């Protein structure tokens, strides 16, 4: 199963690289990019597109990681609360 997953990942990456190459060859012109505080002149359209795509992907990963981190903290807190409740229930059963 792991080998099939790796082969699928490699195939997807190769297709994406091929699509990027086709996009770059069909858009050879250079553009000026102004991001507010820095201006880049004569940047390849394909390179600018790739950078924006990668930055979006990284920001998506960071936001997902933050959500998972919060979820793990909540899970840890709930587990501690459950352990406390079980301990409390055990001491009440012994006293009656």
Image (cartoon, rainbow, N blue to C red):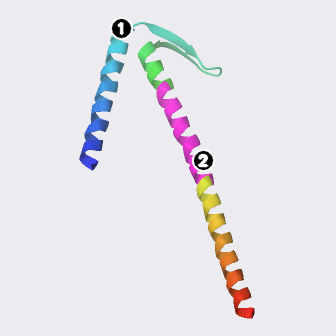
Residue 26 circle label: 1
Q: Residues within 10 Å of mark 2 (few under 14, many from 20)?
A: few
Q: Position of residue 7 (x, y in %)?
A: 25, 39
Q: Mark 2 = which residue?
A: 67
Query: Residue 56, image x and y in percent?
Result: 53, 30
Contact between labelled residues 1 and 2, with CB atoms less than 8 Å apart: no
| Residue 5 sits inside the magenta stretch | no
Q: Residues within 10 Å of mark 1 (few under 14, many from 20)?
A: few
Residue closest to the eye, 30 or 91? 91
Comparing 2 with 86, the one in front is 86
Read off the magenta span: 53-70
Q: Which quadrant holds residue 90?
A: bottom right
Reply above or below: 40 against 9: above
Taking depth in this image into account, of 28 and 80 the one nearest to the observer is 80
Q: Position of residue 70 (x, y in %)?
A: 63, 53
* Predominant SS of the magenta segment: helix
Q: Residue at x 57, y 50 (%)?
A: 68
């Amino acid at each position: 199963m792991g080998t099939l997953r790796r082969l699928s990942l490699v195939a997807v990456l190769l297709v994406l690289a091929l699509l990027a190459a086709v996009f770059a060859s069909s858009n050879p012109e250079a553009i000026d990019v102004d991001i507010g505080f820095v201006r880049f002149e004569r940047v390849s359209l394909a390179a600018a597109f790739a950078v924006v795509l990668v930055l979006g992907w990284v920001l998506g990963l960071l936001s997902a990681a933050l959500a998972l981190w919060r979820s793990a903290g909540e899970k840890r807190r709930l587990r501690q609360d459950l352990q406390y409740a079980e301990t409390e229930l055990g001491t009440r059963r012994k006293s009656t």
